[in-house]
Amino acid sequence: MPASNVTVVTHPLVQHKLTLMRDAGTASSKFRILLREIGLLLTYEICRDLETELVEITTPLETYMAPRLEGKKLCFISILRAGNGLVDGMLDLVPSARVGHIGLYRDPRSLVPIEYYMKLPDQIEERLCICVDPMLATGNSAVAAVHRLKDAGAKRIKFVCLLAAPAGIENFSAAHPDVPILTASIDRGLNDHAYIVPGLGDAGDRMYGTK
Ligand code: URA
């Protein structure tokens, strides 16, 4: 049973594409395309409750009060490197969004996430920030990235991933109960190397053909 701040997108198109991505035989070229397509579909869901305002426009026939998105442009925040693959699809749907990047690596001894890169758009405090990483495994990187965003002033944050492990959800929700999570699947758990199982492997390696 997902926690109340977690939404699982069960749409058949998302699930079908995810199945193709999980398959170890799917090539990197296809994997990237699928990730991008799911990124677009998840964005449609996460934007469901965006505020709109009425503006007067003139159609070829008459003037009309029509809805448009209210407020500052959205900001997608990619947790490097795999977040980029989902963000590409998100930008297909919301091309005017701003994009930030946060790079973290795990210190091998302390296992604490260390920031090596962060670049965010201005006026972050006025934007809805959608933080993106395909894999919510232990949740440590996502927790750290959202702390960085909050330190930078972000006030409205959502988190989007492709797969989540129950432990990652628990860790993330405990640290950031105010940040809703949207995912395409909650998988069974983590293996001894903190990979999500059944999962899809290392998302970055699958995207870029690295090992
Ligand atoms: N990161 C990945 O890319 N895959 C996992 O299963 C866990 C973390």
Image (cartoon, rainbow, N blue to C red):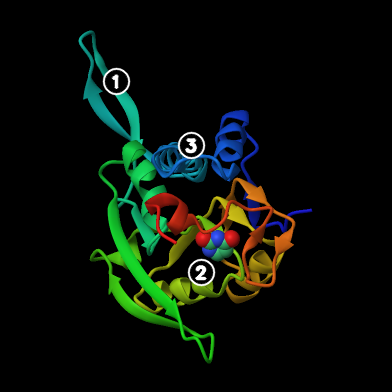
* Point 61% across, 41% down: residue: 9
Please state if 24 lies on the left or on the right of 87 as rendered. right
- Whether residue 179 is visible to the viewer of this picture, yes or no, is no
Q: Is residue 73 above or below residue 147?
A: above
What mark, if any, has residue 41 been given in the picture?
3
Query: Looking at this rendering, what residue extends furthest in the bottom direction?
Result: 109
**Comparing marks 2 and 1, which lies closer to the viewer?**
2
Q: CA distance from mark 1 to mark 3?
A: 29 Å
Sooner in the amino-acid sequence: mark 3 or mark 2: 3
* Image quadrant in which you'd find residue 172: bottom right
Which residue type carries mark 2? Ala
Q: CA distance from mark 3 to mark 2?
A: 21 Å
Asked if the residues shown at circle 2 and circle 1 are in contact, with their CB atoms under 8 angstroms apart, the answer is no
Ligand 1's quadrant: bottom right
Question: Badge 1, how many Cα within 10 Å: few under 14, some, many 20+?
Answer: few
Residue on which the image places disc 1: 64
